[in-house]
Image: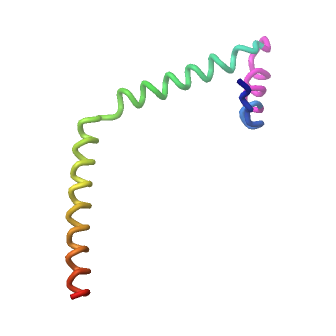
């Protein structure tokens, strides 16, 4: 399987390798792994799924009510 990497991605990896004190080619992967792990933890610990679900249900209910009102309004114009 062939994966084409963008030049920006390769440029970033090269810059990380160049900045490492001993030109270790594994350094970018350690950096990217820690960045990914930190992002995961931030999302896992920082997102309240129950609150998000309640907000989504309220939003969908408000949208349903608005669509019903718009449908009733357009029916009165047609009739």
Residue pictured at 26% horizontal, 41% vertical: 53
* Residue at screen point 79% across, 22% down: 18
Along the line of sight, the residue nearer the viewer: 12 or 53:
53
Tell me if 4 is positioned left or right of 43 in this view: right
Q: Is residue 71 above or below residue 52?
A: below
Residue 8 in the image: x percent, y percent? 74, 37
Q: Is residue 27 magenta?
A: no
Give the residue drawn at x 77%, y 32%: 11
Q: Main secondary structure of the magenta part?
A: helix
Q: Quadrant of the C terminus?
A: bottom left
Residue sitting at x 20%, y 72%: 69
Q: Which residues are magenta?
A: 11-23
Residue 10 in percent (x, y) is at 76, 30
Q: Residue furthest front?
A: 79
Where residue 54 sits, quadrant-wise, is: top left
Task: Tell me where residue 16 appears, x and y as whole percent.
Answer: 73, 24
| Residue 2, image quadrant | top right
Query: In the figure, is residue 39 to the left or right of 73?
Result: right
Q: Nearer the viewer, residue 15 or 49?
A: 49
Q: Is residue 14 left or right of residue 43?
A: right
Relative height, residue 45 to residue 50 (above, below): above
| Residue 31 locus on image (x, y percent) | 62, 21
> Quadrant of the image for the N terminus?
top right
In the displayed structure image, the side of residue 7 where residue 48 appears, left or right: left
Q: How many marks?
A: 0
Asked which colour scheme the image uses, the reply is: rainbow
**Is 31 or 62 nearer to us in this picture?**
62
């Amino acid at each position: 399987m062939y994966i084409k990497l963008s030049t920006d991605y390769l440029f970033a990896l090269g810059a990380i390798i160049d900045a490492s004190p001993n030109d270790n080619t594994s350094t970018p992967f350690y950096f990217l792994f820690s960045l990914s792990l930190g992002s995961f933890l931030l999302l896992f610990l920082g997102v309240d799924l129950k609150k998000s679900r309640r907000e989504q249900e309220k939003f969908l209910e408000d949208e349903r009510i608005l669509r019903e009102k718009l449908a009733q309004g357009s029916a009165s114009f047609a009739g």
